[in-house]
Image: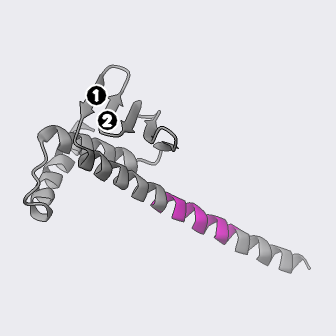
Amino acid sequence: MKKIINNFWEKFKNINKLFFPGIQLTDSQIKVQTIINILCKHNNTEFHLSPISNKVYLINRELSYYIIISDNIISIDNHSLFVTYEFLPWFTYKIVKTIYITIEEKGKKIETEILYNKEKALDKILQQL
């Protein structure tokens, strides 16, 4: 897992320099963004949104990672380590936008599956009649 994170981090640093030459992320920003990107891609990550407090929660029980994002604070917990980072609002907005895009993609997959099952059910009903 550590090797995957390091490889992803190096690739992300190079891509980030190409697309955002004026905005140089710090090492901690890159690491936090990498961790969140990996968790977003993991199948067992749960996403929870709290609209009143405007917080986003990422929970991955399999890997034992819990992340809380609020305003400009990102907290990461894995039972042996708890770290809190305070970033500028544009960075946390960028992170939250990445999470929203992931939620939207997963939602579209679910919607497609539901519509497919609906069509199968209609076909089955027609066959029975």
Q: CA distance from mark 1 to mark 2?
A: 6 Å
Q: Secondary structure at mark 2?
A: strand
Furthest residue to the top? 80
Q: Residues within 10 Å of mark 1 (few under 14, many from 20)?
A: few
The three-letter amino acid code for the residue at tag 1 is Thr
Which residue shows up at 41% across the image and 32% down it?
A: 66
- Residue bearing mark 2: 74
Q: Residues within 10 Å of mark 2 (few under 14, many from 20)?
A: many
Q: Is residue 71 left or right of residue 44?
A: left
The three-letter amino acid code for the residue at tag 2 is Ile
At which x and y percent is residue 39? 37, 44
Q: Quadrant location of the N terminus?
A: top left
Which residue shows up at 13% across the image and 60% down it?
A: 20
**Magenta part of the chain:** 105-117
Q: Is residue 12 above or below residue 6?
A: below
Of the numbered discs 1 and 2, the one sitting upstream in the chain is: 2
